[in-house]
Image: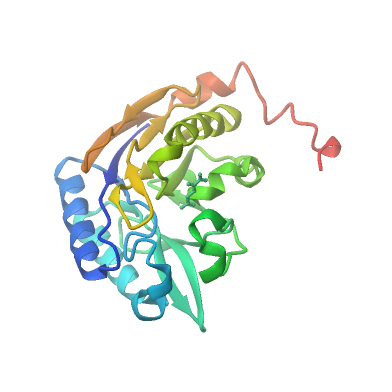
Amino acid sequence: MKLTIALAQLSVAFAQPATNFARVAAAVETAALQGASVVVLPEMWNTGYALNQLATLADPAGQQTKQLLTTLARQHQLGIVGGSVATARHGEFFNTSYVVDDTGRVIGTYDKVHLFGLMKEDQYLSAGKTTNRFELQQVPSAGFICYDLRFPEWMRTLGTTGVDVMYFVAQWPATRIQQWRRLLQARAIENQCFVVGVNRVGDDPDNHYNGHSLVIDPLGEVIADAGEAEQVQIVTLDLAQLQTVRGPIPVFADRRPALYR
Ligand SMILES: NC(=O)CCC(=O)C(=O)O
């Protein structure tokens, strides 16, 4: 089975949700025209890291985001790993990812679990408590947000359930882009799955973001790198490769969980 994915490597207009909603709609349309069956967006694409303005900018219960993503998914008949957006619920703010299938049904809702202190998330956001596993285009998948990538035990929690594609959405600054690349490769190798990482481009008041959205195969090889420009890149995954990697080195069967803490 093949899966054609669009990496929507977008710039995010700081504290300008209306501009960003229009950008996302255009990117999904481009992805559909290029034959994608899944499109992946970056992290916090509605507001950027305008964390001290969330009281006015965050999406109440994610309603506006879900309305847009479900409409686009239905209209273009593709799945959307909706990056993440700043949401407001019951007086708290979250960094929330929605996943929508090609009929326009929300099949995943995930609040970022690991808050990134260096970008002040811990001062403004509440942390999620649940995992994010979903079947998208019949493919068992899991979704994570940016800093989550540094916690391999979090990916393992889902890897042991049988996941073929792990999606990472990010606003990962250029200063640490080599770590982004290496961590994504490590997660693919250790979980013997495809890894799709979508990062933003552009600037905010504190950071420069240089993209390098990546697709990694289960051997850890980079099969697509979107470079540093704003673009929608199309990549086709050949999921048959999973069996050829997992067969000879069955790491999940060989685990010794009784010995691990
Ligand atoms: N938005 C984030 O979680 C950034 C994570 C990051 O930059 C890192 O180095 O980790």
Q: Is residue 126 above or below residue 33?
A: below
Q: How many marks?
A: 0
In percent of the image, x 37 and y 34: which residue is there? 214
Q: Is residue 131 above or below residue 166?
A: below
Q: Residue furthest top?
A: 248
Q: Is residue 219 left or right of residue 2?
A: right
Q: Is residue 234 left or right of residue 92?
A: left
In percent of the image, x 35 and y 61: which residue is there? 48
Q: Name the one closer to the observer, 47 or 113.
A: 47
In percent of the image, x 27 and y 46: which residue is there? 8
Residue 17 quadrant: bottom left
Residue 160, position as x, y percentages in the image: 65, 40
Residue 91, position as x, y percentages in the image: 51, 83
Residue 123 quadrant: bottom right
In percent of the image, x 48 and y 49: which residue is there? 146
Q: Is residue 157 left or right of residue 136?
A: right
- On the question of residue 116 being in view, the answer is no
Residue 113, position as x, y percentages in the image: 58, 58
Residue 229 quadrant: top left
Residue 109, position as x, y percentages in the image: 47, 63
Q: Name the one closer to the observer, 42 or 176.
A: 176
Where does the N terminus fall, quadrant-wise? top left
Q: Residue furthest front?
A: 205
- On the question of residue 40 being in view, the answer is yes
Where does the C terminus fall, quadrant-wise? top right
Q: Name the one closer to the observer, 94 or 243.
A: 94
Q: Name the one closer to the observer, 210 or 217.
A: 210
